[in-house]
Amino acid sequence: MGIKILTYYLLPITYYLLLFPHPSSLIPHPLKDMANLKAIRDRIASVKNTKKITEAMRLVAAAKVRRAQEQVNSTRPFADSLAQVLYNIQGKLQFEDVDLPLLEQREIKKVALLVVSGDRGLCGGYNSSVIRKAEIRAKELTAQGVEYTFVLVGRKATQYFGNRSAPTEKTFIGLEQIPTAPEAAEIGDELLSLFLAEEVDKVELIYTKFVSLIASKPVVQTLLPLTTKGLEEKDDEIFRLTTKGGKFGVERETVTTEVDEFPKDTIFEQDPVQILDALLPLYLNNQILRALQEAAASELAARMTAMNNASENASELMGDLTLSYNKARQAAITQELSEVVAGANSL
């Protein structure tokens, strides 16, 4: 009697499945096997663990962006004081009448390209964009008949140009992710030695300018020889990492340094030219440090974006896998019911 009742209820379901195939029939056959249900569950667990890692990396990058912001703010008083002294000494002297090596304009026969990249990946197109910018600039110099050599910062640029046997003067790898003044001074000393020894006639800096958490821009900037226009620049920008509605954001603000002019009857204990000769290398190191800070912030922001995208993709993949798992499980249950019905009919 029990078998007849089971057959009475299950036969219509069987006919329905024969006339209207279940959506699970669209799934590849291996997914219908019960053995593959465990494989799907394992993959869901693996994707879930990957999402935890990418989310943690995003939060770590955000914390380091805040550290970079704090460092920018901490180094600003020295930069402001240095700019103030240079601005006032410039007002006392006419630079075109002063013979200083760092201000010397020479015929450009060879250029040193300082390229700032990262040591690690998992940061989207950050490294590839700055490397591409360096390649474009190198081709432009070659087309103009000007020689070039690289000074590379970061393992990614070092590996890339090293594999292509590009002319390289010096490499710097393993730097702190939050740049420090001693590191900038070390790079500055190398560039100064190249320029003062007349091994190169110009030094250009290629780095990634920090725009926002979702945008950055590779730029080319002339470092040496220094120009009076660069020394006259008083307005600058700083970035601040903020959180609104649980989401990270960046605010940029222009900081205008109030320059207190020296009294007109100021007497220098040393020759102003000697003071300039001592301060200009510090100014150069400050420019390099600022570029390293911008590049580090850009890399961290790119890593935040990349890890956020990876977390979102993991969530989407988990949803697709869960749907496939449910379809496969439903198909397996339907198959078991069909076998029960077939067995009941045979009886």
Image (spheres, grey):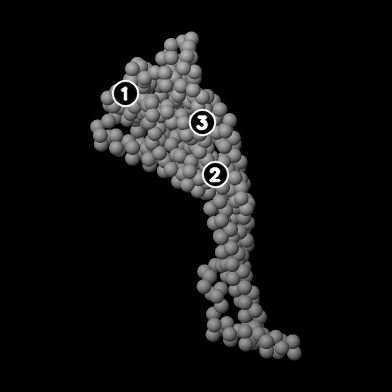
Q: State the SS at label 3.
A: loop
Q: Which residue is mark 1?
A: 105
Q: Nearer the viewer, mark 1 or mark 3?
A: 3
Q: Are marks 1 and 2 in contact (CB under 8 Å)?
A: no
In depth, the one of 73 and 195 nearer the eye is: 73
Amino acid of disc 2: Glu
Q: State the SS at label 1.
A: loop
Amino acid of disc 1: Gln
Query: Compared to 2, does 25 lie above or below?
Result: above
Q: Quadrant of residue 223?
A: top left
Tell me which label, 2 or 3, sits earlier in the chain.
2
Asked if residue 103 can be seen in this view, the reply is: yes
Amino acid of disc 3: Thr
Query: In the drawing, what numbered circle is on residue 251?
Result: 2
Q: State the SS at label 2.
A: strand
Of the 4 image quadrants, the one containing the C terminus is: bottom right
In depth, the one of 311 and 178 nearer the eye is: 178
- Picture coordinates of residue 14 (x, y %)? 60, 84
Q: Residues within 10 Å of mark 1 (few under 14, many from 20)?
A: few
- Picture coordinates of residue 23 (x, y %)? 55, 75
The residue at the point 58 percent across, 85 percent down is 16
Q: Quadrant of residue 48?
A: bottom right
Q: Is residue 42 left or right of residue 193?
A: right
* Total marks in image: 3
The residue at the point 60 percent across, 73 percent down is 331
- Picture coordinates of residue 82 (x, y %)? 50, 24
Query: In the drawing, what numbered circle is on residue 257?
Result: 3
The residue at the point 29 percent across, 23 percent down is 106
| CA separation in Å, label 1 and label 2 | 38 Å
Tell me which label, 1 or 2, sits earlier in the chain.
1
In depth, the one of 277 and 163 nearer the eye is: 277
Q: Nearer the viewer, mark 2 or mark 3?
A: 3
